[in-house]
Structures are given as C-alpha cells and as structure tokens.
Amino acid sequence: MISVTRFDDLGSFRNDWLDAHYHFSFAGYRDPDRMGLGPLRVWNDDEIRPHTGFDPHPHRDMEIITYVRQGAITHEDSLGNKGRTEAGDVQVMSAGTGIVHSEHNLEDEPTRLFQIWIQTDKRGHEPRWDARKFPKVPVADALPVLASGRTGDDGALMIHADAAVLGGRIAQGASVSHGIEPGRAAYLVVAEGSVTVNGETLPARAGVAITDVDAVTVEATGGEAEVVLVDVPLAA
C-alpha cells in the first residue's frame, strides 16, 4: 500500500523565525491517524530564518537525525560538541540518558532541513552526537544509507534503533530501488523535484507511507530529484 500526503496537507506551525511542516503529530498539531510509522515518530520539514534557531533544550531516549537540504545548521550541546552541517549532509544525536542542545542557522540565507526522530531500541544509552559529509552527485541503482542501527550498513552514521535512513539525488529519468523485508515499512519524502514511487506521482515535499510491498522503485520525472527514505519495522 502506498499512502501519499501532499505538502499542503501536512500539519504546520509558523512564527517570526520558523516555518515548520509536520508529517506526523508534533507539538500543537495532533492527528490520531498520523502518529508515526513503527518507531518513526517525527518527520518535520523546517525552514529556519538566518541568524535564528532553536535555543538550548533537553531530550531523552530518542534518535534524532537531521538532513540539511539548504544552507547549514550549527549544533552545540551539553557534552561539549559543536559542529556545522551543510546541505546534503547529515547529523545524528542519540539523546540517551539526557542531553541539552541548540540548533542555529548562523548563515545569511534560510536553512531548510528534515528533522527525523526515531524511537531508541532501549532506554539508557550514553548520549552522543556525530555528523558526516556524503557525496552530492546523483546516485545509481540504490540510495546510500546515511544513518543506521542495522548490521552491515558500513559507512553510515550509527543510531540506536532497528532503522535506516537513506537519501540522495536521482538524475532525471533515472531510478533507484529499495527492498522492504517482511514486517517492515518505509516512509519517503521528496526533498526536491518530483518522482514516481511504484508508478504513483509524488510532487516536491510530499510524503508517502509504504506498507505491505516488498520493494519500492523511485524514478525522477521532473528534472533531478532528491529523496530521503526511512526503513523501519512496523511494530514500534
């Protein structure tokens, strides 16, 4: 089953520095039919104005993955970590037993990013932060794994969850495929461009929940496209 949610149908929040759209229930947005997919709890599409951002705040027992689409985000946390993650790159934060962090756009242009929260495999992990640069050229055949808690996903950022975050750019007319094992599902968001997913058209910034299929094929149909996919077990 492929269930599409268009960008205009997402939950939303806006103030003087943040324009946020929610694929799942978050903060003041509540939809009992959109509470997540397995352990995937949050997928926010955020635009942060220049020289603003999220001031220090705490988290516990959650894997938080940030995929930067435009601009850059600067991270600081209570462990002493500080780093700047640019467009096309990824940072992960395992909140574990507790961490306080801030995320600011120190650039002169808006920062656009996906903020993805995945429930941890167990409570009490040591908190940590990491970031990595990934190739920005169009991919061939399969999306690279950016962050993962699965065995064998070498080169990916580590998370404490039975999940994988994949993403990359697809050249016009090219396609990539991803197999989905029994008992698992995927959620895919189009960061840029338009694509078809198993033949169904998805415009930019739409999301699609993919369940009860054994494989998904994504083809770029409106110029070069960029997509991010999370593979999770259906049971949280």
Image (cartoon, rainbow, N blue to C red):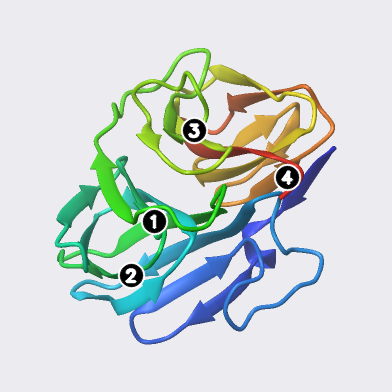
| Quadrant housing the N terminus | top right
Mark 1–mark 2 CB contact (< 8 Å): yes
Residue 206 placed where, x, y %? 62, 51
Q: In this figure, which residue is indicated by the disc labeled 3?
A: 166
Q: SS class of the residue under badge 3?
A: strand
Residue 209, labelled with which disc? 4
Question: Relative to 210, does residue 79 appear above or below in the rendering?
Answer: below
Q: In this figure, which residue is indicated by the disc labeled 1?
A: 113
Numbered circles on residues, count: 4
For marks 3 and 1, give the one nearer the viewer: 3
Residue 210 placed where, x, y %? 75, 38
Q: Amino acid at mark 1?
A: Leu
Q: In this figure, which residue is indicated by the disc labeled 2?
A: 48
Badge 4: how crowded within 10 Å, few (<14), some, or many (20+)? some
Badge 2: how crowded within 10 Å, few (<14), some, or many (20+)? many
**How far is mark 3 from mark 2, CA to CA?**
23 Å
**How far is mark 4 from mark 2, CA to CA?**
26 Å
Q: SS class of the residue under badge 1?
A: strand
Query: Residue shown at 30%/41% (left/top)?
Result: 89
Instruction: Identify the mark nearer the N-term, 3 or 4.
Output: 3
Q: Is residue 206 left or right of residue 55?
A: right
**How far is mark 3 from mark 4, CA to CA?**
15 Å
Query: Residue shown at 62%/46% (left/top)?
Result: 203
Query: Residue shown at 78%/22% (left/top)?
Result: 214
Q: Quadrant of residue 111?
A: bottom left
Instruction: Identify the mark nearer the N-term, 1 or 2.
Output: 2
**How far is mark 1 from mark 2, CA to CA?**
8 Å
Work out whether residue 86 or residue 35 is closer to the camera in this orientation and state it: 35
Residue farthest toward the top in the current orientation of the protein: 141
Question: Relative to 40, does residue 227 appear above or below in the rendering?
Answer: above
